[in-house]
């Protein structure tokens, strides 16, 4: 087991990808894009905008946070990337993190402004926080290039609006901002016929979606009594409409009304009675302006004893699903769908250990630490760890798409570990109530060198079984690359290699520890031939050579010897087994890495992902000196980060030198971080770009 904080910078994607027109935050004053959203927009991947008034004003705690996260998950599960938009301390953020979303939800209601178009300049100027309405979300989405937006329901003409002139700004925004809004129609509390008339006047294309007879929905129920001009039956039909809409360069929006799932639809007469009672309450209490809608929704939820809230949650999740399907179809396009299929959405799959790391760093400056039973003053910290988990999180931050199969116990440590992990990595987590969560205690001396590791890994041997892996067969089928660490059982490894054989997938093996590095190579060779890439250190390399050749290697690895001698000794070991692999990345400590790769990888690194073992060209060996890293905090995290950076660049089609550079830059960030995932990356984009260019330049000069 090689514990590792293991994570590269999310900003790596911005500079290591093929040249393209990409989103630079400076183009959008007061708007900050999450790096995942930057990457997706730059590469025309499907993105769905989500509003934040559902968090700040639409639902009570904790349903608001839970629902917002579930809505994001619906978008991801159906082929798109969610971009929740909100305002925090005057900064408009596109792609709120879970922490930002929760912080916004917990702010007192009187400190968070419900922001429409008119409110944006005030909130930004005063550095306040706000939840974006449909109108404000459309504005921001259009500014950054997001085409599709999912919400619950839009505002409209209020009841008695012909007297009060109370008309939602959502309607005028739809008339002047070209964003497709997917919703369950107009909120039931409003005057729906007048709202549809207003939208027609504004030139808004209104269509129902999969609605018998083209009936337009009215939020809580499936039938508003009005018909839409058009009905769309499938995501592709909707995408075709949006494609024509964009080609015509109409500067108005499109409204797609999706009926609430039938099992959650309310009885129309009962809901109408609840709405009328809520309207009376609002009039009696003098509620007016933008406070009317949140007041009515809360009053209706109370009158219906929560059933309206459950209906609201169900419809917004369903709308998110439909919006993601439409966005994915729109991003594909007829020509691209034929040539690429779903390749741009494929996620690499990682199977390996998830561990709760407890680290203790001695801060006693007067004594050198010895394992003599004495007590030393130390700084204690906890972080999410585990080789497989760390690599998966690194890929998630750098590449944006990844699946993870791992295991935790149903205990307090397991809950702590899950809380420390990004939500998308939790989908494939096995929770076993019969096993304890894996715990690793790491002891570092005052210089930051790891002196002792104590851990329990039984859960990964017992819970990641062939049966549980086969239950996730769809994750294997759709993956461009499988990554496994050596903490799992031989039976699990055999199952993974069988899946690789069935679907002709390459496997990247991270040996993890010198004592278990040879584990998969005891399996039949017709399975192990699917292991196409490995990344051992010298001790692990020696173990693998002995496992494959059946011969004892007398050499004792020592990175402190002369570099020339070290490279020659390592190359001799590599030559014993290199014909079995596309690429061997031998890590040499602070010297750097020695790569033994197929010779054709120098011109096309994508051949390293070739899943077949036949006719592998001769190998070439190249040495890359490690860049000098200032301010090293923790030396145990570089390996997993290097894997994440290298794999990310490889999947993105980069050349071999750039794959190595990506690994080094990601490793550098891990070396400078105290936690498994650095809280911040480079202070600004220019600093990162300068560092990457310098790293790449050094690699080019020192490759041999």
Image (cartoon, rainbow, N blue to C red):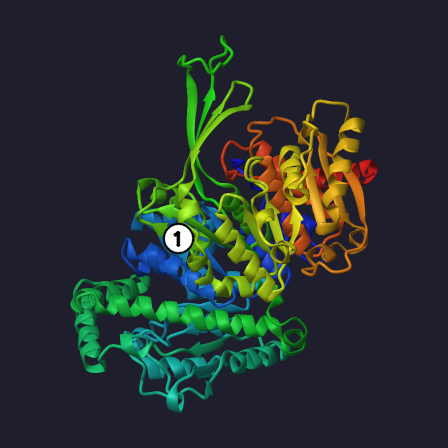
Q: Is residue 357 left or right of residue 528?
A: left
Q: Which residue is mark 1?
A: 430
Q: Is residue 539 visible?
A: yes
Q: Is residue 682 visible?
A: no
- Residue 400 falls in image quadrant: bottom right
| In the image, farthest residue toward the bottom | 213
Work out whether residue 571 or residue 58 is closer to the camera in this orientation and state it. Answer: 571
Tell me residue 626's x, y (percent). Answer: 71, 33
Q: Secondary structure at mark 1?
A: strand
For disc 1, the neighbor class at 10 Å (few under 14, some 14 to 19, many from 20) is: some
Tell me residue 507's x, y (percent). Answer: 61, 54
Tell me residue 631's x, y (percent). Answer: 61, 26
Q: In the picture, which quadrant includes the C terminus? A: top right
- Identify whether 470 is placed above or below 125: below
Tell me residue 459's x, y (percent). Answer: 40, 44
Count of labels shown?
1
- Residue at 63% in and 58% down: 526
- Identify whether 667 is placed above or below 465: above
- Residue at 32% in and 81% down: 222
- Residue at 62% in and 53% down: 528
- Residue 630 falls in image quadrant: top right
| In the image, farthest residue toward the top | 366
- Identify whether 449 is placed above or below 395: above
């Amino acid at each position: 087991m090689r514990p590792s904080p293991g994570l590269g910078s999310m900003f790596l994607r911005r500079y290591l990808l093929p040249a393209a027109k990409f989103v630079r935050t400076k183009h959008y004053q007061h708007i900050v894009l999450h790096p995942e959203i930057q990457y997706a927009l730059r590469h025309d991947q499907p993105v769905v905008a989500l509003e934040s008034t559902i968090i700040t004003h639409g639902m009570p705690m904790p349903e608001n946070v839970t629902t917002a996260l579930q809505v994001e998950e619906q978008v991801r599960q159906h082929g798109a990337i969610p971009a929740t938009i909100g305002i925090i301390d005057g900064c408009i953020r596109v792609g709120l993190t879970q922490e930002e979303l929760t912080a916004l939800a917990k702010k007192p209601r009187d400190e968070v402004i419900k922001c429409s178009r008119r409110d944006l300049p005030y909130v930004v100027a005063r550095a306040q926080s706000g939840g974006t309405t449909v109108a404000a979300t459309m504005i921001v989405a259009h500014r950054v290039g997001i085409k599709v937006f999912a919400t619950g329901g839009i505002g409209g003409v209020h009841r008695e609006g012909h007297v009060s002139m109370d008309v939602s700004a959502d309607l005028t925004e739809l008339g002047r901002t070209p964003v497709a809004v997917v919703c369950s129609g107009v909120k039931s509390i409003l005057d729906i016929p007048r709202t549809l008339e207003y939208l027609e006047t504004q030139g808004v294309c209104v269509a129902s979606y999969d609605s018998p007879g083209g009936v337009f929905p009215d939020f809580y129920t499936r039938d508003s009594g009005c018909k839409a001009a058009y009905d769309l039956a499938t995501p592709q039909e909707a995408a075709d409409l949006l494609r024509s809409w964009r080609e015509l360069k109409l500067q108005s929006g499109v409204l797609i009304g999706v009926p609430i799932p039938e099992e959650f639809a309310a009885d129309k007469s009962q809901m109408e009675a609840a709405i009328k009672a809520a309207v009376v309450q609002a009039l009696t209490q003098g509620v007016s302006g933008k406070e009317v809608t949140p007041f009515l929704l809360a009053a209706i939820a109370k009158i219906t004893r929560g059933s309206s809230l459950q209906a609201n949650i169900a419809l917004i999740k369903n709308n998110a699903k439909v919006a993601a399907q439409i966005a994915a179809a729109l991003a594909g396009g007829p020509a691209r769908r034929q040539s690429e299929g779903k390749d741009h959405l494929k996620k690499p799959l990682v199977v390996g250990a998830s561990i709760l790391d407890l680290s203790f760093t001695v801060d006693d400056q007067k004594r050198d630490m010895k394992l003599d039973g004495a007590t030393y003053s130390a700084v204690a910290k906890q972080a999410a760890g585990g080789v497989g988990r760390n690599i998966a999180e690194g890929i998630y931050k750098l590449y944006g798409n990844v699946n993870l199969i791992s295991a935790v116990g149903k205990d307090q440590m397991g809950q702590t570990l899950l809380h420390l992990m990004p939500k998308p990595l939790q989908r494939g987590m096995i929770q076993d109530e019969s096993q304890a969560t894996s715990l690793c205690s790491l002891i570092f001396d005052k210089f930051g060198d790891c002196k002792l590791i104590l851990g329990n890994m039984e859960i990964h041997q017992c819970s990641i079984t062939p049966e549980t892996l086969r239950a996730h067969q769809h994750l294997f089928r759709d993956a461009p690359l499988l990554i496994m660490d050596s903490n799992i059982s031989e039976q699990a490894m055999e199952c993974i290699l069988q899946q690789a054989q069935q679907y002709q997938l390459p496997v990247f093996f991270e040996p993890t520890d010198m004592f278990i590095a040879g584990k998969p190579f005891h399996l039949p060779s017709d399975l192990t031939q699917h292991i196409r890439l490995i990344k051992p250190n010298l001790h692990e390399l020696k173990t693998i050579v002995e496992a494959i050749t059946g011969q004892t290697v007398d050499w004792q690895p020592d990175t402190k010897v002369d570099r020339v001698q070290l490279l020659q000794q390592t190359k001799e070991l590599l030559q014993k087994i290199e014909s079995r692999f596309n690429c061997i990345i031998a890590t040499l400590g602070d010297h750097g890495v020695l790569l033994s790769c197929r010779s054709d990888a120098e011109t096309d690194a994508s051949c390293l992902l070739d899943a077949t073992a036949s006719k592998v060209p001769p190998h070439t060996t190249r040495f890359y000196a490690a860049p000098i890293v200032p301010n090293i905090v923790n030396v145990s995290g570089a390996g997993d980060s290097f894997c994440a950076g290298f794999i990310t660049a490889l999947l993105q089609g980069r050349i071999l030198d750039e794959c190595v550079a990506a690994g080094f830059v990601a490793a550098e960030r891990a070396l400078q971080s105290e936690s498994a995932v650095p809280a911040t990356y480079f202070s600004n984009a220019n600093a990162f770009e300068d560092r990457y260019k310098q790293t790449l330049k050094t690699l080019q000069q020192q490759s041999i």
